[in-house]
Image (cartoon, grey):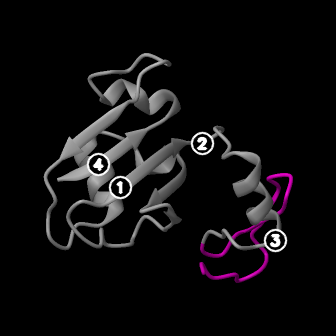
Amino acid sequence: MLDIRLFGEFRKFAENSKPTDNSILNLQFRENESLEDLLIRIGIDPQSIGEILVNFNPVELDNIIPRDESRISIFPLGMHLLCGASHLKGHNFILKKGVSVDYYGKTDTSSSVESN
């Protein structure tokens, strides 16, 4: 079973969707399923994702979900991670393929930065 934590506007996909609730969705693990496929299964447009973490690590949408019992946290665009994670972005520890994000959230697609 996957433990999916939903934040912001994505809370609506969980049974408990109030801001004071833990909006958790439990879905069956599917072998070789990518995160993008999982998002589509839930009903979330992959283009609306701001951040996605698997077992507390930032990942790309084409990553395969590593194992059953994985914890997946999904944040929409415009919902920023806590300062600590934003700080890591500023030091290029959290990157998106082909996009460098500075401390203030500004992107630079001119570089060919790869995800760590």
50 or 108, which lies in front?
50
Residue highlighted by disc 4: 3
Q: Nearer the viewer, mark 3 or mark 4?
A: 4
Residue 44 belongs to the span the image colors magenta: no
Amino acid type at circle 2 is Leu
- Which callout, 4 or 1, points at the residue further toward the start of the chain? 4
Q: Nearer the viewer, mark 1 or mark 3?
A: 1
**Looking at the image, which residue is at 70% across and 83% down?**
112
Residue highlighted by disc 1: 71
From the viewer's perspective, is 52 left or right of 85? left
Residue highlighted by disc 3: 91
Identify the secondary structure beneath mark 3: loop
Amino acid type at circle 1 is Arg
CA gap, disc 2 and disc 3:
20 Å
- Which callout, 2 or 4, points at the residue further toward the start of the chain? 4
By secondary structure, the bulk of the magenta-drawn segment is best described as loop
- Which callout, 2 or 3, points at the residue further toward the start of the chain? 2
From the viewer's perspective, is 77 left or right of 70? right
Q: What stretch is highlighted in magenta?
A: 97-116
CA gap, disc 4 and disc 1:
5 Å
**Looking at the image, which residue is at 36% across and 41% down?**
44
CA gap, disc 1 and disc 3:
25 Å
Query: Dot 4: within a 10 Å radius of its alpha carbon, few (fewer than 14), some, or many (20 or more) residues?
Result: some
Q: Quadrant of residue 88?
A: bottom right
Q: Which of marks 2 and 1 is in front?
A: 1
Amino acid type at circle 4 is Asp
